[in-house]
C-alpha cells in the first residue's frame, strides 16, 4: 500500500515505540502512588512535561497531558466556556474547523445556551483579520481558530489574528495546532491555549496535549482524582505521556528537512495535476505543502477513494473523523468552491517518507481512474 494519508495519522517512529515498550514494561507503577515505583514514574512524567515546556519555551505548569487533540479541544473550549460564562456568552470560531471544535461549539449552543459566531473564510481558506475584528464583541470570551486546516492545508495568519483578539477584546485565543506542529513554525506565545496530538507526528495514538497559560481557568470535564493538576481525573497514561517529549523533539528536529522535501513533491504534483483535464486543485499555493486537496470533476470522492484503494493507494476524502458521512467537504463549501468540488475532493497528505516514485505512481492511478470514468 502506498500511504498518502499522513494528515490522518502517521506510523509510529521506531525510537518512540522502543522507548514506550521499555517504559511500559519497567515503569508500570501508578504515577500517583507514593511508593518508589510510583515516584519513579511520576519523576519521568514530570521530566517529559518539562522537556515539552522547554521545546515550546513555556513553563511546565502550562502543559496538560490528554488522550488526543479532540479531548484537548473539548477541554479548552467547553472547559473555558463553562468556567467563564459569568464574563460573557459569546464565542467565535470559523466554519472550517475540525469536527472536534465544531461539534463542541454546537453543544455549547444547544445545551448550554452560548452564542457562537462562525466566521467565513476567503477563497484561500483563511480567516481574514478584518472579518474577525468586526465579529468581536464586549461579551466575547473565547476565540478558537485553527493554525493549519486539515483538509486543504490553508494556514491562518495566527500572529495577526492573535493581535486583533488581544488588542480589541477581553477574549482568550485558543488555537488547534494539530496540523501545524512539526511542519511549520508554531509560536504558542501568541496563543492562550493550544491543542496538539502525538499520532500526527509519529507518536502514539492515545496521547495529546493542551498548552494553557496559567492564569486561564477551566472547568475540568473529568472529575475525580488529582491528575494533571485536577484538570483531568483518571490514572495517567504515563508511558504514552513520557514518550511524547521524545516524539515532539524528533518531529521538530526533522521539521525543516521534511518541509523542503514535501514542498518539492507538492509543487511537482501541482504541476502534473494542473495539466490533467477534469482535475482542479483546491489547496491555495500559500497552503502547507504537507497537504494537497484536489477534485476530480468526473469522479465522486467515494468512488475515487475506493478505486485508488483497490490500486493500492491510501488517501482521504476529507477529515478522517467525518469519513463515515457522505463525502461533502464543509471546508471546500466554505471556501466558495461549490458543490461539485466539495463532493469530488480527495486529500493527499505527504511526509518525509513519501518518494517521487510513489507520487508518480499515484498521479498515474488518478489519471487511470479518471479515464475509466469517461474523461
Ligand atoms: N484537529 C485537527 C486539525 C485534526 O486534523 C485532527 C485529526 O484529524 C484533530 C483535531 C483530532 O485529533 P485526534 O485524533 O488526536 O483527536
Image: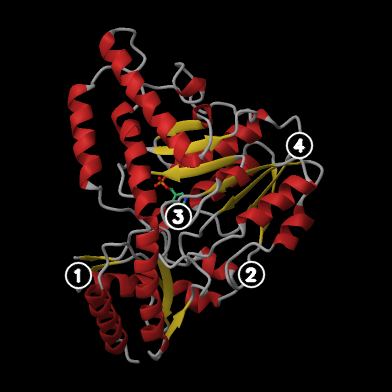
Whichever of labels 4 and 3 marks the residue nearer the N terminus, that label is 4
Q: CA distance from mark 3 to mark 1?
A: 25 Å
Q: Are marks 2 and 3 in contact (CB under 8 Å)?
A: no
**Which residue was labeled with disc 1?**
312
Of badges 3 and 1, nearer the viewer stands 3
Circle 4: element type: loop
CA separation in Å, label 4 and label 3: 30 Å
Element type at mark 2: loop
Image x and y of residue 332, in percent? 53, 69
Q: Is residue 27 visible from the viewing direction of this image?
A: yes
Position of residue 203 relative to residue 259, above or below, is above
Image quarter of the N terminus? bottom left
Q: Which residue is mark 2?
A: 122
Q: Position of residue 54 (x, y in %)?
A: 46, 36
**Which of the marked residues, 2 or 3, is nearer the chain's N terminus?**
2
Q: CA distance from mark 4 to mark 1?
A: 51 Å
Tag 4 or tag 2, which sits nearer the N-term? Answer: 4
Which residue, given by chain and number where applicable, does mark 3 sit on?
A: 179
| Mark 3: C-beta under 8 Å from nearest atom of ligand 1 | yes
Residue in the image at 30% along x and 65% along y? 4
2 or 4: mark nearer the eye: 2
Asked where in the image residue 360 lies, by quadrant, the reply is bottom left
Give above or below for 152 relative to 273. Answer: above
Instruction: Identify the residue shown where x is 72% and y is 57%.
Output: 132
Q: Position of residue 68 (x, y in %)?
A: 41, 40
- The answer to which image quadrant residue 354 occupies is bottom left
The quadrant of the image that shows the C terminus is bottom left
Residue hosting label 4: 88
Q: Is residue 206 visible?
A: no
Amino acid at each position: 500500500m502506498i500511504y498518502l494519508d499522513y494528515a490522518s495519522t502517521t506510523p509510529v517512529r521506531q525510537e518512540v515505540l522502543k522507548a514506550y515498550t521499555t517504559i511500559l514494561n519497567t515503569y508500570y507503577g501508578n504515577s500517583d502512588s507514593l511508593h518508589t515505583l510510583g515516584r519513579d514514574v511520576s519523576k519521568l512524567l514530570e521530566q517529559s512535561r518539562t522537556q515539552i515546556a522547554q521545546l515550546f519555551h513555556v513553563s511546565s505548569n502550562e502543559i496538560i497531558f490528554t488522550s488526543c487533540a479532540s479531548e484537548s479541544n473539548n477541554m479548552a473550549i467547553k472547559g473555558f466556556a463553562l468556567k467563564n460564562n459569568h464574563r460573557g456568552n459569546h464565542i467565535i470560531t470559523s466554519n472550517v474547523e475540525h469536527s472536534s471544535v465544531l461539534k463542541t461549539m454546537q453543544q455549547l449552543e444547544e445545551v448550554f445556551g452560548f452564542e457562537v459566531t462562525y466566521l467565513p473564510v476567503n477563497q484561500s481558506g483563511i480567516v481574514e483579520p478584518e472579518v474577525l475584528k468586526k465579529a468581536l464583541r464586549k461579551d466575547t470570551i473565547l476565540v478558537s481558530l485553527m493554525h493549519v486546516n486539515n483538509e486543504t492545508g490553508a494556514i491562518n495568519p495566527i500572529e495577526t489574528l492573535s493581535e486583533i483578539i488581544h488588542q480589541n477584546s477581553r477574549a482568550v485565543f485558543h488555537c488547534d495546532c494539530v496540523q501545524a506542529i512539526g511542519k511549520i513554525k508554531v509560536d504558542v506565545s501568541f496563543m492562550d491555549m493550544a491543542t496538539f496530538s502525538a499520532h500526527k507526528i509519529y507518536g502514539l495514538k492515545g496521547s495529546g496535549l493542551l498548552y494553557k497559560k496559567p492564569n486561564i481557568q477551566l472547568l475540568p470535564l473529568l472529575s475525580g482524582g488529582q491528575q494533571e493538576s485536577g484538570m483531568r481525573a483518571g490514572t495517567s497514561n504515563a508511558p504514552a505521556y513520557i514518550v511524547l517529549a521524545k516524539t515532539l523533539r524528533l518531529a521538530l528536529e526533522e521539521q525543516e528537512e521534511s518541509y523542503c522535501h514535501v514542498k518539492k513533491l507538492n509543487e511537482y504534483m501541482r504541476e502534473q495535476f494542473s495539466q490533467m483535464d477534469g482535475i482542479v486543485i483546491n489547496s491555495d499555493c500559500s497552503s502547507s505543502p504537507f497537504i494537497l486537496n484536489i477534485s476530480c470533476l468526473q469522479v465522486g470522492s467515494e468512488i475515487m477513494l475506493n478505486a485508488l484503494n483497490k490500486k493500492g493507494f491510501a488517501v482521504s476524502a476529507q477529515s478522517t473523523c467525518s469519513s463515515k458521512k457522505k463525502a461533502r467537504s464543509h471546508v471546500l463549501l466554505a471556501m466558495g468552491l461549490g458543490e461539485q468540488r466539495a463532493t469530488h475532493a480527495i486529500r493527499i497528505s505527504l511526509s518525509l517518507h513519501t518518494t517521487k516514485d510513489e507520487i508518480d505512481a499515484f498521479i498515474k492511478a488518478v489519471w487511470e481512474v479518471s479515464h475509466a470514468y469517461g474523461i
